[in-house]
Image (cartoon, grey):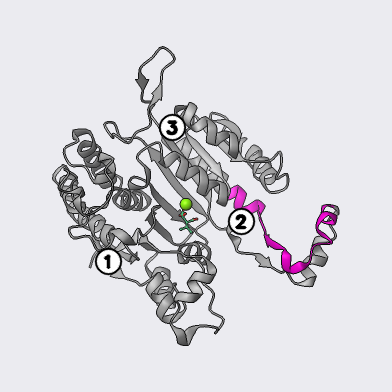
Amino acid sequence: MAKYTVVKMPGDGIGKIVLPEAIRVLDAVGFDAEYVHADIGWERWVNEGNPLPDATLDLLRKHKLGLFGAITSKPKTQAQAELRPELRDKGHVYYSPIVGLRQVFELDVCIRPCRSFPGNPLNFIRQKAGGGFEEPKVDAVIFRQNTEGLYAGIEWTNPPEQVLGALATHPKFKAFESVPSEEIAISTRVFTRNACRRIVTAAFEYAKKHGYPSVTICEKPNVLRETSGMMEEVAKEVHADYPDIQRWSTNIDAQMMWLTKNPEDYSVIVAGNMFGDIVSDAFAGLVGGLGFACSANIGDEVAVFEPTHGSAPKYEKLDPPIVNPIAMILSAVMMLDHVGETDKADAIRNAIAAVVEEGKVRTYDMMRLPGGPDALSKGAASTTRVTEAIIAHLS
Ligand code: IPM
Ligand code: MG
């Protein structure tokens, strides 16, 4: 029997392409695991009205480790329209199944490392004052609160009267009192002290363990006084236990500006759910974009690892496939770190670094080519060639 059982959830589109590539690399490095398949995503929604089947939840409950490819998400009305006719108007509501997974298993700590690989032509470069360019080394690790905030799903269009009544107890609601309720949409932003403490503590622990000098709380407490304010307050308390690490605070808007001015100044960054979503994509853009953006969703029991890219359905049917598998492979590497197989994790990371640095095998995105069937004839490597190059560099 294998030492680990991993639930593999390829999901939609290119998720089905990149996930098997990651498993090939895990096999090649000698990770002692077997993989059980679980369905998730659009097909299940269209045919059954539920993109997150119970059987998938059961498998994760049992095996605790999940590898996730990608899913297709569409806005409410479009999701309804694509549902099988006999399922329409039966009260099925589409919710993103990855957001669902995070909530069902309380995967409240999301880790998104954004590190530049030397030699990656997609790395951010900056113009120097005296002319010429420089390439700052980016090594930022985003800790995103993964279950609450604007993603808690507590929202209404045309809110019920009790909700309006409750809101009317706030003096600022006066400004909206004369607006007809069907003209009002509300998405709530709920923070709890416990969840703030968990994400901030995870961030400081990570900084300590990996020798990062600072933790930056990236919120907006000057305006979102209660929620961002709570995160700030908790961070001050938690910081007391980590005197050797600096605590910085930035506002999300200013952070988006500074990250292209001086990205090398940031190391560990903590944010609530929505701002964490934003700031992690922004940093990913400095280190190669979605082809390199990996993540871990970690709870007390279960952990799910996923590239942050979407399902890119237009690339699914290209044969041979051309999409960059590195984000998925790096996500699998985070799984190795999580279970303590750090030597194997390092071996894969080093192999990826070597392939990137050599620059001989590059997917279309790394060559700044448009994605499409002729990318390969223009010199881009296929998905599988990249995997093979990484495997060849495992020592
Ligand atoms: C991410 C994605 C998801 C999110 C989407 C697909 C629901 O953008 O993982 O960052 O917003 O969390
Ligand atoms: Mg995102």
Cα–Cα span, label 1 and label 3: 34 Å
Tell me the magenta residue range. 172-198
Task: Point out residue 7 in the picture as x, y percentages from the top left corner.
Answer: 33, 66
Residue occupied by mark 2: 150
Instruction: Return the residue at label 3.
Output: 211
Residue matched to label 1: 35
- Report whether 394 appears left or right of 142: left
In front: mark 1 or mark 3?
A: 1
Label 2, residues with CA under 10 Å away: few <14, some 14-19, many ≥20: some
Q: Name above or below for residue 254 compared with residue 130.
A: below
Q: Decide: marks 2, 1 in contact (CB < 8 A)?
A: no
Q: x%, y% of residue 327?
A: 32, 49
Q: Three-letter amino acid code at disc 1?
A: Tyr
Q: As shown in the figure, which amino acid type bears the numbered disc 3?
A: Gly
Residue type, label 2: Leu
Mark 2 or mark 3, which has the lower sequence index? 2
